[in-house]
Image (cartoon, rainbow, N blue to C red):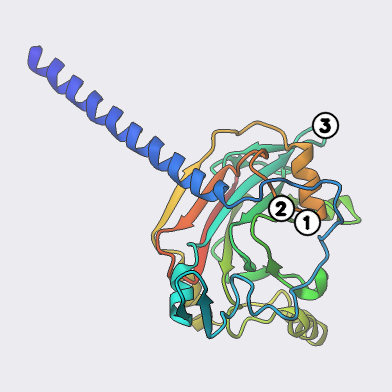
Amino acid sequence: MKLKLLIALSALSIAFGVFIVSAQQDEDVRGAFLESRPKTTNLNGPSRRHRRRPANNANVAGTSSPAVTTNANANTTIGRSDVKRMQPAIGLGYTIFMRDASGRSIRIEPTHEFRTGDRIRLALEPSIDGYLYIFDSEDGGPPKMIYPDPRLDGGDNWIEAHVPIEVPSSEETEERLRWFEFYGQPGGDRIYVVVTREPLPIVPIGDDLVAFCAASKDKCPWQPPADVWAKIDSASKAEVKVATTKNFGEAQTEREKVAMTRGLGLDKSVPPPSVIRINASSREPVLVTVLDLVHK
């Protein structure tokens, strides 16, 4: 009996230790992500939602770096490779909101099992300036690119650090287009959210995507070739640090709504995303987040 008790206490001690380490890791990841948020969100400032990538973006994080940068304090020259090493690891925070009976957006767990008629929306918050792609694979079928969309911002997919993106947009003119709705036979959707520092090669965006869909409506949404998709799928297996915020069941705040629809940066006073993922290495040029949405 004493031996069994000692074994039980030992197991409990180990489990408690793992819990403390896990909680500390969560706090570290969450803190690193939120630290780069702006100090304040100017809710009275001009809307920036429908803006396209700056034409002159040589010094914008996530795009091509200048060949050299001079550090005046140290009086040294920093090369392109050094600039890349100094860039922070790519991070993405996401929250799944579900529409309740009163029309409010409620945070739900990613593992939630959905029923026919449920409506959801993704809220995405990148930690860097860069590019966003979203692919959807229905019931294990071939992936299709659902973002960028040629109908939105001319197919542009430029994103800014901590300026949230909602997919689909709550500003769509028709209610049915403002949410992903589960219908038909039960199944599953695997969503790939891809954040990159620079545009993915071969993948059409902007004017190229608009032209492609105009000329080949039967081939739009665009589907990536096997070799392109293999690289994205491989990137999804890279090591990442993850933190989860236990705010499920809470409604979207008014500050979140305003920032979301007007393209404003989220400050530290706004609730953190439900899930935060950051590449373990700052050298990784891509962060791929996979969401499995189960329809029962």
The amino acid marked with disc number 1 is Gly
Residue 144 placed where, x, y %?
Answer: 64, 71
Of badges 3 and 2, nearer the viewer stands 2
Residue 6 placed where, x, y %?
Answer: 13, 18
Q: Which residue matches tag 2?
A: 265
Q: Residues within 10 Å of mark 1 (few under 14, many from 20)?
A: many
Q: Earlier along the polypeptide chain: callout 3 or callout 2?
A: 3
The amino acid marked with disc number 2 is Gly
Under circle 1, the secondary element is loop
Residue 225 in view in this figure: yes
Mark 3 vs mark 2, CA separation in Å:
28 Å
Q: Earlier along the polypeptide chain: callout 3 or callout 1?
A: 3
Q: Residue at x 60, y 50 (%)?
A: 94
Q: Which residue matches tag 3?
A: 102
Q: Is 192 situated above or below 255?
A: below
The amino acid marked with disc number 3 is Ser
Q: Is residue 184 left or right of residue 8?
A: right
